[in-house]
Amino acid sequence: MPELPEVEVTRIGLLPHLCGRRVSGICVRSPSLRYPLPHDLGARLIGRRLAGIVRRGKYLLFDFEAGKLLVHLGMSGSLRLVRADLPPDKHDHVDLRFGDLALRLRDPRRFGAILWLGQDSGTHSLLRKLGVEPLSDGLTAKVLHEAIRPRRAAIKQVLMDSHVIVGVGNIYASESLFRAGIHPSTPAYRVSRARCARLVDAVKGTLQDALAAGGSSLRDFVGSDGKPGYFQQQYFVYGRADLPCRVCGAPIRSLRQGQRSTFYCPRCQR
DNA sequence: CTGGTCACCTGGAAGC
DNA sequence: TGCTTCCAGGTGACCA
C-alpha cells in the first residue's frame, strides 16, 4: 500500500495522538522484518517522550530526543493505533505502548523495517543518498531535468529511483506520466526541459490529490481497521489495462518495466 | 557510475 | 475442491 501519500497520511493521523506522550512498554512478536529488529528496543524507548514524527521519502522517523526510530512500511505494512489490550493479528509484529494505546505495526510480507538511528539520523546510509522531496520547493523542472539528463533508462524507472526523487512508487509513477502526457518507455535523457516542467507539476498534483483523498477520511484513525481511506482514489491508468482511457477512450495498455507493471494510454502519452 | 536482475516474504486470485 | 502459478503498493545487493 504505502507510497508517499499513504505514509504521510499515517504520519498526520498519528501525530496528534502520540506527540508528547511517553513509551510505557513495547512488545516484539517477530524476530525480524527486512532487517533484524533492534534487540534493545525496550531499553532505548521505554520512558522516552515522543517529540515528533517526520517523514523522509517513505521513511517515518519517530523523534525520541535520545535518537530516532526509523519505520518503513515496505509493500504491505501499516501502522494503527489500537487499545493496548486488543488481541494482535497474525501479522502484528510490533507494539509500542503509550499507556492504554498501542501503536501497532502490521506487515504480512515483512518487507518493512524498524531501526534505531541514534543521534546520527541524517547520516544513516538508508537516508543519506535519498533524492529530492517531491512536494517540496526543491523539486523544480530544472532540478529534475539535470538529474535525469545522464540517464538512458526509461523515464518511468528513473522516476521511481529514490536517489532521484523519493516517494514515487509504482502506482503514482504511472499516474504522473499519464498526467504529463509522457510515454513511460521514453528514455529519461530525451525528456525535454519543457516536458520536465509538466512532469514536475504532474508528480506534485498526483501526490497532493492522493494525500487529500487520504486525509479526508482520517477521523477514525484511532481504533480503525487501519485503512484510512486512500483506497477510494480513482486512478487514471493504474490497474486499468484494456479499459477505456478516462480522457480519450482508447484502451489502456500495460507493459513490464524492471519486473513491475506499468499502465499507460497509447493515445494520450507519447 | 549505470542498468539489469535477484532476493526478501506472505497471501489472494486466477488457472487447471 | 484442491493444487499450481502468478502477481502484489519497496528497495538494497550484486553483477556485467
Image: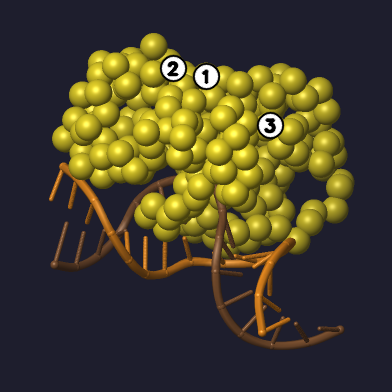
Chain colours: A yellow, B orange, C brown
Are the residues tagged 2 and 1 within 8 Å (C-beta)? yes
Q: Is residue C8 left or right of residue A134?
A: right
| Residue A105 at x, y percent in the picture | 67, 46
Amino acid at pointer 2: Asp
Amino acid at pointer 3: Gln
Q: Which mark is residue A92?
A: none
| Residue A117 at x, y percent in the picture | 43, 38
Question: Considering only order in the chain, which callout, 1 or 3, is on the residue closer to the N terminus?
Answer: 1
Chain hosting mark 1: A
Q: Is residue A117 left or right of residue A124?
A: right
Residue at x 35% of width, y 25% of height: A132
Does label 2 lie on the same chain as label 3? yes
Question: Considering only order in the chain, which callout, 2 or 3, is on the residue closer to the N terminus?
Answer: 2
Find disc 3 in the rendering and name its residue.
A233
Find disc 1 in the rendering and name its residue.
A205
Find disc 2 in the rendering and name its residue.
A201
Task: Name which quarter of the figure residue B2 lies in.
Answer: top left
Q: Is residue A108 visible?
A: yes
Does label 1 lie on the same chain as label 3? yes
Residue at x 29% of width, y 16% of height: A194
